[in-house]
Amino acid sequence: MSGFLAVLRRELRLALRGGGEVLTLLLFFVIVGAIVPFAVGPDKALLARIAPGIVWIAAFLSMLLGLDRLFRPDGEDGTLSLYRLADLPLVAVVAAKVIAHWLTAALPLIVASPFLALLLAMDGETLLRTIVSLLLGTPALAAFGGIGAAVTVATRRGGLIAPILIAPLCVPVLIFGVGAISPLGGPDQASAAMLFLAALSLMALALSPFAAALAIDWGED
Amino acid sequence: MSIETSPKQSWWNRLAHPGQFVIWTRPFILPLAILTAVLLALGVWFAFFNSPADYQMGDTVRIMYVHVPTAWLSQFVYATMAVSALGTLVWRHPMADVSMKAAAPLGAAFTAMALFTGALWGRPTWGTFWEWDGRMTSTLVMLFIYLGIVALWRAFDDQLRAARVVAIFTLVGAVNIPIIKFSVDWWSTLHQPSSVFRADGPTMPGSILTPLFIMFFAFTFLFATLQLLAMHTEVKRRRVMTLERRAARGEAA
C-alpha cells in the first residue's frame, strides 16, 4: 500500500510541478467548449440544448490529449522497466497512474465546467447534472485511456494511435454521460443512464489496470 | 530402452511450425476456392432469377443476399480474432499470431461492405443513406475498432511483440463490443429486429431463405479461403523479412 501511495504521490508531484501541463489541458477544455458558438452561431436556445454534449466532447478530447504523458515519459527514461522489476505488482503501479491521471486530467475539468456552462447558457439544474455525470463518467475514460496508452507505449508513433483505439471503446461512456444529463425518454431514463454510467466506470476501473499492466509487461522485453 | 528426444509430432505441434503449417494447409486452398466459387455462382443465380421480389421493397430486397452475410461476417471475423488472441496469450501458438493479423483487414473489409450495401439498401427503402440507428451505429463503431487494430499492427516494428499487445487489445475489444451494442441500442432503435434466428422459426418464406443461406455459406467460405491465403502470405512475408535481415547482417560483417 505504501508503494502504491508513493507512486501516486510521485505522479501528482510530477504533474503539478512539471511545466503546468494541468493548466494547458484546462485551457484546451475551455477553448474547445468556447469555440463551438463560433461554429454554430450565438443562438442561446440552441447552445443551451447542445451544451451537455459540448461539455462532454470537450472533456473527452482533453483527456485523450493528456493520454500520451501517462506511460511514455516513464517508458522512455526507463522508469517503466524498473516498475516491472519492483516488489509492487505492476497492476498496482498502473492503477496508481490511472488514478493520478484522473486527478490531474479530469478533476480540473470538472471544476472548470461551471465556467463553460455559463458561456453555453446552461441552466442551474442541468449544470448540477452535468457535474454529477462527469464525476461518474470520467473515471471510465481514464481507465480506457490507460489501456490505450499501455498498448501503444512500446511503439514509436503511439501518440496518434492511442486516441483512435480508445475512441470507439468510449462510445458507451458518451452515450450514458449525455443521456444522464438530457434524457431522451424522460427523467426516469436519466437515473437509469446515471446508474449505467457508474457501473461502467466501476467495471472499467477495476479491470483495466490488469489489461494495461499485461500490455506493458508483454510489450516491453 | 531409450529416452525419446525428438519433439512429439502431434498435429498441434506440427501446425505450430509456420513452414509445416503452409505445407499442411496448402491442399485446402484450391478446394475451398472452388467451393466458394460454386456456392457464390449458385447463390447469385438464386438471388437474381429464382427468388421473388418483395411486395413492399421490390427488387431492392436482393441487396439483402450480400448485406446479411457480410454483416454476419463482420462479427464472425472478430470472434475468429478473439479466439486467435486467446491462442496467442494462452498457448503462445505462433500461427495464432498470423491468423489474428490476417483476419483484421478482412474483418474491416467485410464490415465496410456491410455498411456500404446497407446504405444502398436504406436509400430506396428508408429514404436515407444513413440513419443513426442502433445496429448501423454499432457496425460503424465495429469498423473503427477493426481499423484501429490494423493501425496498431502497423505501428510495431517487431511483429512478435506486436502480436501479444494486439491480442490483449483484441480481447479488451471483445469484452467491450457487447457493451457498445447494448448502449447504442439503448440510445436509438429503428432497425428491424432479428427475423431469421428466432424461437418461433424464421419469419421469411423459404423462397428467400434458400438463396440467403447459400450466400451465407458462400461468404463464410470466402472468408475461410482469404484467411488461409492471407496467413500463407504473412508467413512468407516474415520469412522474407528474416532473410533480408540476415543478408544485411552478412553484408555488414
Image (spheres, coloured by chain):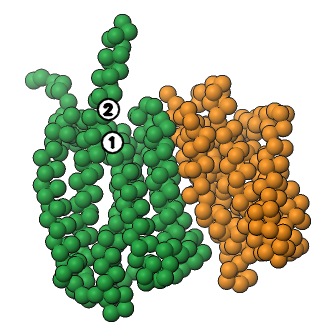
Residue A129, how many percent across, how many down?
Answer: 80, 70
Q: Residues within 10 Å of mark 1 (few under 14, many from 20)?
A: many
Residue B129, how many percent across, how many down?
Answer: 48, 74
Q: Residue furthest left?
A: B1
Q: In this image, A44 relative to B43: left or right? A: right
Residue B108, how many percent across, how many down?
Answer: 41, 56
Mark sitting earlier along the chain (1/2): 1
Q: Mark 2 points at which residue?
A: B238
Q: Name the residue under label 1.
A: B98
**To which chain does the residue with label 2 belong?**
B
Residue A38, how many percent across, how many down?
Answer: 80, 62
Chain B colour is green
**Residue A143 vs residue A185, the one in the foreground:** A185
Task: Look at the numbered discs 1 and 2 and tell me whether their residues touch, using CB distance below 8 Å.
Answer: yes
Q: In this image, B252 relative to A52: left or right? A: left
Q: Which residue lies furthest to the top in this view?
A: B253
Element class at badge 2 = helix
User: For the image shown, how many numbered marks are present on the structure?
Assistant: 2
Relative to B10, residue B71 above or below: below
Relative to A107, residue B209 above or below: below
Q: Residues within 10 Å of mark 2 (few under 14, many from 20)?
A: some
Q: In this image, A49 relative to B146: left or right? A: right
Foreground: disc 1 or disc 2: 2
- At 18% from the left and 24% from the top, the residue drawn is B5
At label 1, which amino acid type do we have?
Val
Which chain's colour is orange? Answer: A
